[in-house]
Image (tube, grey):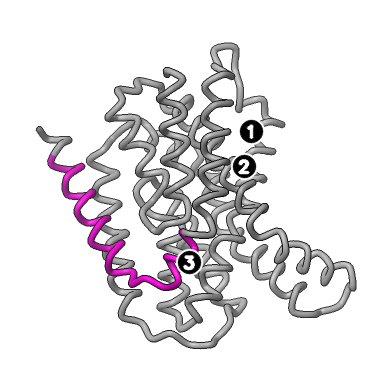
Amino acid sequence: MEAWEAILLGIIQGLTEFLPVSSSGHLELGKAILGDNSVPEESLLFTVVLHFATALSTIVIFRKDIIEILSGLLKFKWNEETQFVTKIAVSMIPAAIIGILFEEQLESFFGGSIAFVGAMLIITALLLWLADRAKNTGKKVSFAHAFIIGISQAIAMLPGISRSGATISTSVLLGNDKSKAARFSFLMVVPLIFGKIAKDVLGGELFSESTNYTTLGLGFAAAFIAGLFACTWMIALVKKSKLSWFSIYCLLVGVIAIIVSFV
């Protein structure tokens, strides 16, 4: 992979992480367009690194919320902050189980199959279309809802299924407030990404002798910087704009991807 390709893919990740359009799906489409012939494991490595970068940008943007949560935890009381962290932990269970039991199967999907990505984008479009018709409320995410949202996050490990789109849509369809659903969605993925990175590092699976650290570093930097600029704007866009616009976009890209795969 060339340096400019790594930067381009990093920018794609940074921009699409905070929109319900599937960053992983766009990365796979981008790699297919650029002619990336990496084996699934190497392709997944680059994807994980870029997700790690945007996780860091999420922490920077939500630093006040995170500090408030940590302050509440240190009081060692069953307060709102402790409950929020517990809900985050509950939401991680489905993805953790699937990630451990079906890791090899998941890796095989990150090999540039744009027809599969296109089909998953169409499913994302359907989810967003349904969520757009749900009424906005003032309800907070409950523990039961946190687990159900976690199931959506686990399914969104497939390229083409938008993680934010799936989790926010599921939360909204369950009757939760859109603003609270977006905040929960963006914060719930941070510990999951860090857990994935830690698992791969400890297992010695993340890097190899053939790893190109330059392209990884450039991709990481591009995704982090793009995420910092995009996060605030994108989150506001998700909250204020209608999800149907993103639904139309995912549908069009999904259909085009499927057509191109056959052509």
**Image side of residue 245 versus residue 229, left or right:** left
Query: Gap in Å between the C-alphas at discs 2 and 1?
Result: 6 Å
Between 203 and 43, the residue placed more toward the observer is 43
Q: Is residue 87 above or below residue 112?
A: below
> Which x, y percent locates residue 256?
17, 45
Q: Give neighbour class at mark 3: few <14, some 14-19, many 20+ (Cα, 10 Å).
A: some
**Label pair 3/2, CB-CB below 8 angstroms:** no
The secondary structure type at the circle numbered 2 is helix
Q: Residue at x 82, y 72 (%)?
A: 72
Question: Can you say which quadrant of the picture contains the C terminus?
Answer: top left
Tell me if residue 256 is in the magenta stretch. yes
Q: Is residue 102 left or right of residue 245?
A: right
The reply to whether dot 2 and dot 1 touch (C-beta < 8 Å) is: yes
The tag earlier along the polypeptide, 3 or 1, is 1
Image coords of residue 161 (percent x, y): 37, 53
The residue located at (89%, 72%) in the rendering is 76
- Which residue is farthest right? 75
Q: Label 3: state its secondary structure.
A: helix
Instruction: Give the prevailing secondary structure in the magenta stretch.
Output: helix
Q: Position of residue 16 (x, y in %)?
A: 42, 49
Of residues 60 and 43, the one nearer the viewer is 60
Q: Nearer the viewer, mark 3 or mark 1?
A: 3
Question: How far apart are labels 3 and 1 at the CA level?
Answer: 33 Å
Q: Which residue is mark 1?
A: 200
The label shown at residue 196 is: 2
Residue type highlighted by circle 1 = Asp
- x then y, percent, for residue 60: 67, 52
| Mark 2 burial class by Cα count in 10 Å: few <14, some 14-19, many 20+ | some
User: In the orientation shown, which residue stands out farthest toward the left?
Assistant: 263
Q: Which residue is mark 3?
A: 236
Q: Which mark is residue 244?
A: none
Tell me which segment is drawn in magenta: 234-259
